[in-house]
Image: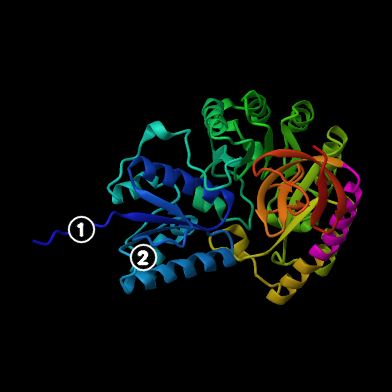
Amino acid sequence: MKTKTLRQDKVNVITLGCSKNLVDSENLITQLHANDFDVVHDSNEEANIIIVNTCGFIDLAKEESINTIVQYADIKSKGGIDKLYVTGCLSQRYKDDLEKEIPEVDAYFGTLELPGLLARLNADYKHELIGERSLTTPHHFAYMKISEGCNRTCSFCAIPLMRGKHISRTIESLVKEARHFATMGVKELVLIAQELTYYGLDLYKKRALPELLDALCEVEGIEWIRLHYAYPSKFPREIFDAMAKQPKVCNYLDIPLQHASDTVLERMKRQTTRLEQQELILYARSVVPDIAIRTTFLVGFPGETEEEFNDLCDFVEEMKFDRVGVFQYSHEEDTSGYLLEDDVPQDLKADRANRIMEIQQSISLDHNLNRVGQTLRVLFDRKEGEYFVGRTEFDSPEVDNEVLLTAAEQFVRIGDFAMVEITDAEEYDLYGKVIY
């Protein structure tokens, strides 16, 4: 008599986009594990259920998300997988269109529909898991989303359409999560949000990021706390006092400025000016002299003239930021910028992005050469080829500079700190030797 073998479901969660999406995927994976699912993340292992967590930020991100959905829809149509689900920002914004264009997907879910996605998988949403999370990052650092959504009305940005209004998490819940991470061996917390400096206004009727930092610094085992995605308008300057006071708060700030021409900033509805941005950066450097400031700029916004772009170039050269990223403007439906004519040609957008990065490349090299001879505390992330690869407090995972040690000559443990003397530098890498 033959017996029927039932194959256990295996889920592969595919994450596209930013670290905020990664946190959402980690929460999903945590819930699935608690429901006894076999789950992998961004894996080449065979799985019969695929969940694609999409990004819808700009055209390139949307294209990558759509291509990924189509790829798995094709695999499903050939019998390679049983079920395909889509969640995240793209699904939130274009659910109706996607259902018509890619009907092979079994169901689409928005950014806040985790319980519904779990229910579709016959899994329970376990409220008691809030504050606990599986990590897909190396276990010595974790992203911590301190709020969801954004109340800003920047004319180029569709994030409020996909993520909704700003909602802060309580300080107590974040401290609980940090303690959980510390028991897992996490040493670095990267605080993320759509708008970090708005934290607490809805809950505490004031900007409460400094109070949150004080509370997180009390968590034993956490040694670095890093700040990402701060908005320059009405910036709570006491954050710099907290940074100067608290050794655990990295001397690092990611503050997307987007532009430096007052006329472009006005069209972008950024509620700030070049002078205000400059004064904020100079103030930060006066309170925290060794602060590393990362920023991003958006080129090719509707109507951007060569003169306005040159204002931005001058600003980058003058302010000498430690880290710079550049996006090319993407014409997003339902934003106020969409009412403007997208009149900067695509090749000119690309050229302007390259020109900014060429300016920054020289600045970055100068900054790095100034580090030669210094001894810095380095957290090591991985071994890659012939090098151990780590970061200083001035560098965030995946997007910033790295410190390389020759593995044939010295040894460090992944996830540990070491004091490293910097012996050489390139535009985006430092080289060193372990002192202790």
Tell me: residue 347, above or below residue 228: below
> In the image, is residue 358 part of the stretch drawn in magenta?
yes
Provide the residue designation for mark 2.
99
Question: Residue 233: percent from the left, percent from the top?
Answer: 72, 42
Q: What residue type is labelled 2?
A: Glu
Q: Can residue 274 be seen in this view?
A: yes
Real-space CA distance between mark 1 and mark 2, rounded to the nearest whole angstrom? 34 Å
Q: In this view, does 58 lie to the left or right of 244?
A: left
Provide the residue designation for mark 1.
5
Q: Residue 175 carries which label?
A: none
The C terminus, quarter of image = top right
Which residue: 74% across, 36% down? 250
Q: In this view, does 47 lie to the left or right of 307?
A: left
Q: What residue type is labelled 1?
A: Thr
Mark 1: few, some, or many residues within 10 Å (few <14, many ≥20)?
A: few
Q: Is residue 113 left or right of residue 138?
A: left
Question: Residue 252: percent from the left, percent from the top?
Answer: 75, 41
Q: Nearer the viewer, residue 153 or 59?
A: 59
